[in-house]
Image: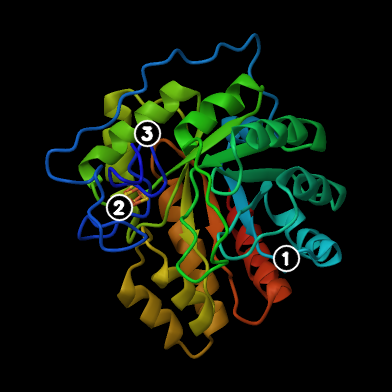
Amino acid sequence: MSDEQGCPKRMTYGPCGGVRDDASCELDQRPCPFAQPRAEVVRWTEPTAPLPTGPSSRLLDAARSGPVVLSDLTTRAYDAAGLAAVVDVLRGSCDAVLVGEHQNRPDFPPALMAMLVAQAGGTPWMTLTCRDRNRVVLEQELAGLALAGADGVLCVTGDVRAPGVRPGVTQVFDLDGTRLAARARECGHAVAVPEAPAAVPRALRPARLLQKQRAGAHLAVLNHVATPGEVADFVTAARALGVGIPAIAAVAVYTDERSARVLQRFPGLHLEDARVEAVLEARDVREAGIEAAVAEARALLAIEGVVGVNLSGLGSGAGELAGARVKAEIGDRIREGR
Ligand code: SF4
């Protein structure tokens, strides 16, 4: 599908997770062609790449014997020393660190980021997006990530760059996340794919995850939803369709106004507003935010098919190290109970 036909990311296996609640595009008011009333899931028809052996991944191995914790990495861009300091705070509290790729905050290339995280003692899971790289450069990164110690790759299409952010810079989208997942599997990576259970069109989301499994995914990383019950409904529906890959569910980590509002503004993410306000009105907001995250994690881990949680968001508006300390405390409390 071309931009002219409706999708600015030229997605084949849409919709992305950013569809707005009125079925319009994450970029503007255009209707998302994958989310209209008669839309059907786009089926993966290519063969899944065979592997002589399963991928080597510490996170996937750990998930076979108990719940795992995956912590988002939040650092200043192009700051290797800052990255090492944040990883040093996180590394004892989680099984792996998830490195993002943001439309408004470019950073070192993913292979270099993986190397820096590994050198700092973390287990890097790397997000790779299709926005800023053509197919050749994506293949270069997949090869580089294998050498750089990446434990796995989260294959995403990526957000469209917001209006006004780096105007005049092209956006590539040669591939979408599903096709990137297939390429990553061919390269021998442990492959994760995102899915957004609460994003429109909700009824198609479980079948969409099934297509990503067929493309080669080993793991699903789910976006925030308002309640664990919605995750349970999604996972149950996906398993009924034949999804057998495990899921990691997102836990919203916020301990102040700024870190909460950042999560609430994100298209495709759904938080329970009453819960957010209860945390923000607490006498000790930091402790209330940590307790809310731990409680959410425990509820999510009780769902069959959910093997871990992703501690997601800034964690704190007081800086990267403060946010990392919040996530580390949450990770420690979750792991103490496992
Ligand atoms: S919401 Fe996503 S899939 Fe739909 S048109 Fe926009 S970019 Fe494409």
Quadrant of residue 53 in the image? top right
Give the residue pinned by disc 2: 199
Give the residue pinned by disc 3: 12
Residue 169 at x, y percent in the picture: 57, 58
- Gap in angstroms between the C-alphas marked 2 and 1: 29 Å
Mark toward the viewer: 3 or 1: 3
- Gap in angstroms between the C-alphas marked 3 and 1: 31 Å
The amino acid at mark 3 is Thr
The amino acid at mark 2 is Ala
Of residues 248 and 314, the one drawn nearer to the viewer in this rendering: 314
**Residue displayed at 73% across by 59% down:** 90
Asked whether, in this view, residue 52 is left or right of residue 8, the answer is: right
Residue 277 at x, y percent in the picture: 37, 81
**Residue displayed at 71% across by 59% down:** 107
- Gap in angstroms between the C-alphas marked 3 and 2: 18 Å
Of residues 135 and 298, the one drawn nearer to the viewer in this rendering: 135
Q: Earlier in the sequence, mark 3 or mark 1?
A: 3
Task: Note whether 274 is above or below 75 in the view shown.
Answer: below
Q: Which quarter of the figure is the N terminus placed in?
A: top left
Residue extending farthest left: 38
Mark toward the viewer: 3 or 2: 3
Give the residue pinned by disc 1: 77
